[in-house]
Image: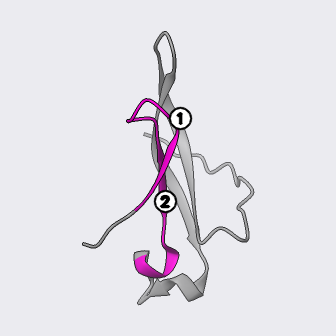
Amino acid sequence: MKVILNKAPMIEECPLNIEYSVEDILEYPDHFIVLGVAINTSASGQNLIEGLPNMKKMNPIIYTRAEKQPTYWSIGEK
């Protein structure tokens, strides 16, 4: 697989940015699922420990409609 970096703009205030290459889009009656491959990441130094993302410092959230309504969740302990 040939990976082409698009040099997409990254959000400076975002603790972690991930650039994806879209591989497929699955269409359903009420939503789409976009399948992709992560091809580039960037994170600010303050959110890294030994060059790896520190999830506790970043405090990421997840958006889901699993409960049949838009809901944001925080990630719990390991």
Image position of 19 (left or right of 27): right
Residue 1 to residue 60: above or below: above
In the rendered image, the vertical position of residue 74 relative to residue 71, given as above or below:
below
Left or right relative to 67: residue 18 = right
Q: What is the number of the mark on residue 59?
A: none
In percent of width and height, residue 65 lies at: 45, 35
Q: Which residue is mark 1?
A: 22
63 or 11: nearer the eye?
A: 63
- Residue 53 appears in view: no
Mark with earlier residue (1, 2): 1
Q: Under tag 2, what secondary structure?
A: strand
Residue under the image location 54 percent in, 58 percent down: 40
Residue that mark 2 sits on: 61
Please state which of residues 73 and 17 is positioned toward the viewer in this rendering: 73
Which residue is rendered at x = 38% and y = 35% of the image? 66
In the image, is 4 to the left or to the right of 24?
right
Looking at the picture, does residue 2 appear above or below residue 78? above
Q: Position of residue 14 (x, y in %)?
A: 65, 67
The amino acid sitting under disc 2 is: Ile
The colour scheme used here is: one colour
- Which residue is pictured at 24% across the width and 72% down the height? 78
Q: Disc 1 on helix, strand or loop?
A: strand
Magenta-drawn segment: 56-74
The number of callouts visible is 2
Quadrant of residue 11 within the rendered picture: bottom right
The answer to whether the residues at label 1 and label 2 have Cβ atoms under 8 Å apart is no
As rendered, which of 71 and 63 lies closer to the eye?
A: 71
Please rate how many residues cluster around mark 1, counting C-alpha atoms within 10 Å: few if below 14, some from 14 to 19, many from 20.
Answer: few
